[in-house]
Image (cartoon, grey):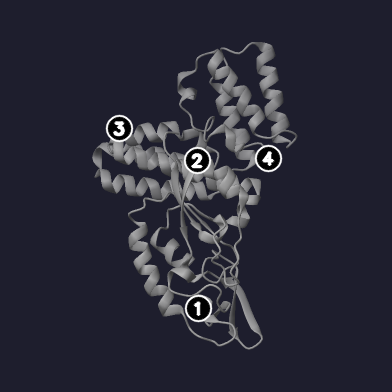
C-alpha cells in the first residue's frame, strides 16, 4: 500500500479525553494494528456540537425510531444542537473521502444499534441508534461502518476490514477507469470473494456487467455497488468458503498430481469440519497458483484480500 486508507473513528477510541467524565476509551487494536494501514479522522459529536468536558451524561428518550438526546439529570434536550452540528460535519466529511467508520458502542450519540431508549417511566427499548451514528449511516448507507466492540470478534473484524479494502479498490476503479471495461475487470478480480458471500448475487452482478455496453456508466456503477454491498453484508460462512475452494481446485484439475489433489481435498475437508482456519487451504491454493502459473487465480482478491500483517482468516 502506498498510502493509508482514511476512516472516521470516535475520538475517544484514539485516546482523546473527550468523554463525559474527562476520560477516554483507547482501543489499542485500532491505533496499533489498524493504524499501520489506516489514517484516522477523529470525531466526537458531543464535543463537536459544543458540549464541555466533563459534562452531564446523556440518554435517548421518546420514540425509539426518532429519539431525543437529553441529559440524564437535568433533562436538557440537545437533539437540535446535535442535528445542526451533524449536518455541518457531514458536509465537511464529504471532503475527507472516508472509506469506513468505527463508532463507539453503547453511546447515545455514536452507538449503531441496541441503544437503550427511555420512552416512558419504567419502560425502555433496546432498539435505538445514536443520533450522530444514525445521521452518518443515513448519509453514507454504503460506507462500511462498525462499532469498536465488534472488532474484537474475529469474524466481524474480518468482515469490516474486507469491506474497507473492497470499497477502496472500488473508488480506485472509479477514478482510474470508470468504463464498462473497467467495471468488468473489477468484477472479474472479485468474483471468488463475492462468491464467498453470495453465489446468487454473484450471478446477478455478472449479468449486470455483461449489459454494460448498453447502459449509462453512472447508472451501471450505482446499481453495481448497491448490489455488491448487499452481497458483502451477507456472512461468508464455512460452507460458502468450501464451495469457493472447490471452484479454485477445479482450475488445477489437469495440473495437480494425484498426491497434490488428495492433499488439497483433505485440507479443504478439514477446513469444512472446522479443524483448520481458512488461511491454511488458501495458502496451499496460493502455492499451486504460483507453481502452475494460473493467471486467472493470480488476480483473485479472494486469495490475497488484505495485508498479511492484519492476520485475517486465521480464526475463520
Query: Which label number is shown at residue 67?
Result: 1
Tell me the distance, in whole angstroms, between the alpha carbons under discs 4 and 2.
21 Å
Give the residue at mark 3.
181
What SS does tag 3 mark? Answer: helix
Q: Nearer the viewer, residue 174 or 281?
A: 174
What SS does tag 1 mark? Answer: loop
Using a 10 Å C-alpha cutoff, classify the residue at mark 1 as few (fewer than 14 neighbours), some (14 to 19) or many (20 or more): many
Picture residue at 57% right of the left edge, 72% below the top: 20
In percent of width and height, residue 183 lies at 34, 36
Picture residue at 53% right of the left edge, 83% below the top: 62
Say whether residue 235 is visible: no
Are dots 4 and 3 in contact, CB under 8 Å? no
Picture residue at 46% right of the left edge, 40% below the top: 202
Q: Earlier in the sequence, mark 4 or mark 3?
A: 3
Q: Earlier in the sequence, mark 3 or mark 1?
A: 1
Q: Nearer the viewer, residue 174 or 35?
A: 35
* Quadrant where the image shows the C terminus: top right
* Quadrant where the image shows the N terminus: top left
Using a 10 Å C-alpha cutoff, classify the residue at mark 4 as few (fewer than 14 neighbours), some (14 to 19) or many (20 or more): some
Using a 10 Å C-alpha cutoff, classify the residue at mark 3 as few (fewer than 14 neighbours), some (14 to 19) or many (20 or more): some
Give the residue at mark 4.
315
Foreground tag (1 vs 2): 2
What SS does tag 2 mark? Answer: loop
Residue 203 sits in quarter? top left
Q: Earlier in the sequence, mark 4 or mark 2?
A: 2
In percent of width and height, residue 17 lies at 56, 64
Give the residue at mark 2.
37
Picture residue at 64% right of the left edge, 31% below the top: 279
Tell me the distance, in whole angstroms, between the alpha carbons under discs 3 and 2.
29 Å
In percent of width and height, residue 27 lies at 61, 53
Amino acid at each position: 500500500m502506498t498510502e493509508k486508507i482514511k476512516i472516521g473513528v470516535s475520538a475517544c477510541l484514539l485516546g482523546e479525553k473527550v468523554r463525559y467524565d474527562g476520560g477516554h476509551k483507547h482501543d489499542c487494536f485500532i491505533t496499533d494494528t489498524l493504524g499501520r494501514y489506516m489514517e484516522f479522522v477523529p470525531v466526537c459529536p458531543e464535543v463537536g456540537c459544543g458540549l464541555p468536558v466533563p459534562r452531564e451524561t446523556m440518554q435517548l428518550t421518546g420514540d425509539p425510531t426518532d429519539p431525543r438526546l437529553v441529559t440524564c439529570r437535568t433533562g436538557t434536550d440537545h437533539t437540535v444542537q446535535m442535528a445542526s452540528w451533524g449536518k455541518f460535519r457531514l458536509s465537511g466529511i464529504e471532503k475527507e473521502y472516508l472509506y469506513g467508520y468505527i463508532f463507539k458502542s453503547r453511546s447515545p450519540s455514536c452507538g449503531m444499534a441496541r441503544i437503550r431508549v427511555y420512552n416512558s417511566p419504567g419502560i425502555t427499548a433496546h432498539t435505538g441508534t445514536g443520533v450522530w451514528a444514525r445521521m452518518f449511516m443515513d448519509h453514507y448507507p454504503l460506507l462500511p461502518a462498525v462499532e469498536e466492540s465488534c472488532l474484537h470478534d474475529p469474524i466481524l473484524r474480518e468482515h469490516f476490514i474486507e469491506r474497507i479494502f473492497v470499497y477502496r479498490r472500488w473508488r480506485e476503479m472509479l477514478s482510474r477507469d470508470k468504463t464498462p471495461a473497467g467495471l468488468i475487470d473489477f468484477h472479474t478480480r472479485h468474483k471468488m470473494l463475492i462468491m464467498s458471500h453470495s453465489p446468487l448475487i454473484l450471478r446477478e452482478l455478472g449479468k449486470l456487467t455483461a449489459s454494460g455496453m448498453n447502459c449509462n456508466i453512472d447508472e451501471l456503477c450505482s446499481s453495481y455497488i448497491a448490489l455488491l454491498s448487499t452481497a458483502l453484508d451477507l456472512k461468508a460462512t464455512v460452507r460458502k468458503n468450501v464451495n469457493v475452494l472447490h471452484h479454485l481446485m477445479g482450475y488445477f484439475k489437469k495440473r495437480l498430481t494425484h498426491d497434490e489433489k488428495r492433499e488439497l481435498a483433505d485440507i479443504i475437508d478439514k477446513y469444512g469440519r472446522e479443524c483448520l482456519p481458512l488461511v491454511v487451504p488458501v495458502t496451499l491454493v496460493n502455492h499451486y497458483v504460483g507453481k502452475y502459473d494460473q493467471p486467472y487465480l493470480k488476480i483473485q482478491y479472494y486469495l490475497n484480500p488484505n495485508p498479511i500483517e492484519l492476520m485475517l482468516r486465521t480464526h475463520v
